[in-house]
């Protein structure tokens, strides 16, 4: 179920719902870049391309990954804050995903 609340964004990235574990890059981000969402500051630890996701909190192996208030997958290994989140470290839970 989706949580209610406003989007949080900087000019470079966007958190769709409060409580999400990932944000979306609105431009290419490089390792070392600092993103800010109010009081939340995230240092990017590896390159994240436009439209891709990065962790805004540490995500443990086996933990659900939340985007837009919905579970989009499960972490296949520990993911540190600021890391690129994609098929190399999450398994999709959407219908038909393998």
Image (cartoon, grey):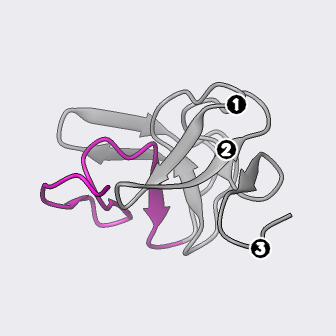
Residues at circles 2 and 3 in contact by the CB criterion of under 8 Å? no
- The quadrant of the rendering that contains the C terminus is bottom right
Can you identify the residue that label 3 sits on? 96
Q: Residues within 10 Å of mark 3 (few under 14, many from 20)?
A: few
Question: What is the CA distance from the residue labelled 2 to the residue labelled 3?
Answer: 15 Å
Residues at circles 3 and 1 in contact by the CB criterion of under 8 Å? no
| Residue 28 drawn at (x, y percent) | 57, 69
Find the magenta span and give its range. 1-27
Q: Nearer the viewer, residue 57 or 46?
A: 57
Q: Secondary structure at mark 2?
A: strand
Residue 9 highlighted magenta (yes or no)? yes
Q: Nearer the viewer, residue 15 or 43?
A: 15
Q: Main secondary structure of the magenta part?
A: loop
| Residue 79 drawn at (x, y percent) | 67, 33
Mark 2 and mark 3 lie on one chain; the one further toward the N terminus is: 2
Q: Is residue 94 left or right of residue 87?
A: left
Can you identify the residue that label 1 sits on? 62
Can you identify the residue that label 2 sits on? 74
Q: Please report the residue visible at 59 percent of the width from the left and 67 percent of the height from the top.
A: 52
């Amino acid at each position: 179920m989706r949580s209610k609340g406003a989007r949080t964004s900087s000019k470079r990235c966007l958190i769709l719902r409060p409580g999400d574990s990932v944000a979306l890059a609105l431009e290419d981000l490089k390792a070392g870049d600092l993103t800010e969402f109010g009081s939340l500051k995230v240092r990017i630890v590896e390159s994240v391309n436009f439209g891709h996701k990065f962790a805004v909190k540490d995500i443990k192996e086996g933990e659900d990954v939340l985007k837009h208030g919905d579970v989009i997958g499960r972490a296949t290994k520990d993911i540190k804050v600021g890391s690129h989140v994609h098929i190399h470290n999450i398994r999709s839970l959407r219908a038909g995903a393998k």
